[in-house]
Image (cartoon, rainbow, N blue to C red):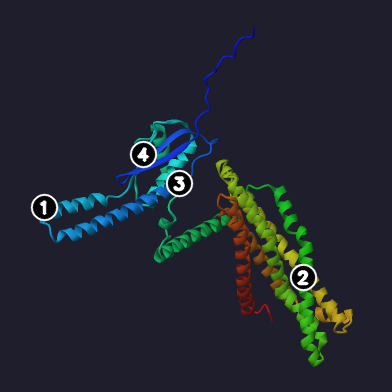
Amino acid sequence: MPPAPIATDNPAPAPPTARADCTDQRILLHLAGRWRLDQRIPEVSEVAVLIDHAGADSAKTADRVSTENARRSGSTDGADSTDAAESTDATSQPLALSFETSALSDWDSALVTYVADIERLCAARNIDCDSSALPEGLRSLLKMARLTAAPDESTHDRGPSFLTRIGLDIGDLVRSTGEIMAFFGEGAIAVRHFFAGRARYRRSELWVIIQESGADALPIVSLVSFLVGMILGYIGDQQLAQFGARIYVADLVGLATVIQMGALITGIVLAGRTGAAFAARIGTMQVNEEIDALRTFGIPPMEFLVLPRMVALILMTPLLTLYADLLGILGGAFVGTLVGGVTLTAYMVQTQAAIGWNHIIQGLISATVYGAIVAASGCLRGMQCGRSAAAVGEATTSAVVTAIVFIVIAAAVLTVIFDAIGLSG
């Protein structure tokens, strides 16, 4: 005869329940069962509905008692009035909520979240929430949750005042000015060490930077310069054709390109291409703390990083400008011969007669200044870069904007200087 099966006492765990009772201006919330994340947790809205009903009943009761006391006060003595006032105060006491957890089995963060929601609900309705009956571990977790809770949006700081912002902006301006002065001071020392042969930099890296900022920039410089020459030639041909002087398109395009446009176009192209690359590369090194490592090893970042880039652009910008001048003149010749009906030989002879060495020198001096501006802007913003990926993008944008603005300012100043010293005549 087979043995009888052995009965086991292993009941299924009770599901989590939350039952609320409201008596005498007090809500008692009974928490029972197993409160785990894998269980279906009761909704907080059920307690919210009970609180709202209790608050409404309390208000109605307080109004009814107040009305009866007011009607009775005219026909009662002082003692009865005092008793009526005490009755009104007792009836109008605010609601309070407490917990009862004797039937609570086990719990995890699901119960913490539920009780925290109940506390926020009570705070929003101005109800006192008594958590003294909760388990000690649960109270500790709730305390930590209150400390790390997000602040209310209504209490967010509106930011500094207008005068405070002005003071902060002035402080940033002073700090930035000091950083710029320190940058150029260290740059002057690095240049002195360079000419003395004591600068610490990698010569192989200098040649790489020369190639990146020079030969690699030829395609974009060629395209932009040729198109600008065509634009100048087309506009000049339209105006000079009214006077039958289309041959002087060569003078217009040649002088404008050699004196100003060739150097200006080259500087702006290098600002958007090479200057941005300098800022991004040095800024990334700043984020990765590579510049701090150089200082730790006693290697000046100004000599190791900035000096090769300054030298490369100061050397290559005039050469790129000469190339841009040639392409600009060819662009003007293309329009002059195709639209203006001028022969290529006549155009080139007229261009050669119009351009002098003083005009070429103006362009080369301007190009040297623009190259120094682009290199300084890119390296400065890279050295000022913050310690985040977003800061690298901001440094790159700032480098391009700074370079272009100072190139335009330098162009205006150099034009006045050249005219004052008689170089433009």
Q: Residue 293 carries which label?
A: none
Which mark is drawn over residue 79? 1
- Front in this rendered view, residue 304 or 23: 23
Q: In this view, does 41 lie above or below 330?
A: above
Residue 225, label in figure:
2
Q: Earlier in the sequence, mark 2 or mark 1?
A: 1
Q: Which of marks 3 and 1 is nearer the N terminus?
A: 3
Q: What element carries label 2?
A: helix
Sequence-first disc among 4 and 2: 4
Q: Is mark 4 on a helix, strand or loop?
A: loop
Disc 2 versus disc 1: nearer the observer:
1
Task: Give the CA separation, mark 2 to mark 3.
Answer: 75 Å
- Please report whichever mark, 4 or 1, sits nearer to the chain's N-terminal start: 1
Write down the residue under mark 3.
46
* Helix, strand or loop under label 1: helix
Instruction: Please state the horizontal and vertical placement of residue 222, each as a whole percent of the image.
Output: 79, 66
Q: Where is residue 99 in the image (x, y as percent from the top left)?
A: 37, 38
Upstream in sequence: badge 2 or badge 3? 3
Q: How crowded is mark 4: few (under 14 residues within 10 Å), some or many (20 or more)?
A: some
Q: Which amino acid does label 3 sit on?
A: Glu
Looking at the image, which is closer to me, 11 or 240?
A: 11
Dot 3, how many residues are within 10 Å of its Cα: few (below 14), some (14-19), or many (20+)? few
Q: Name the residue under label 4.
A: 131
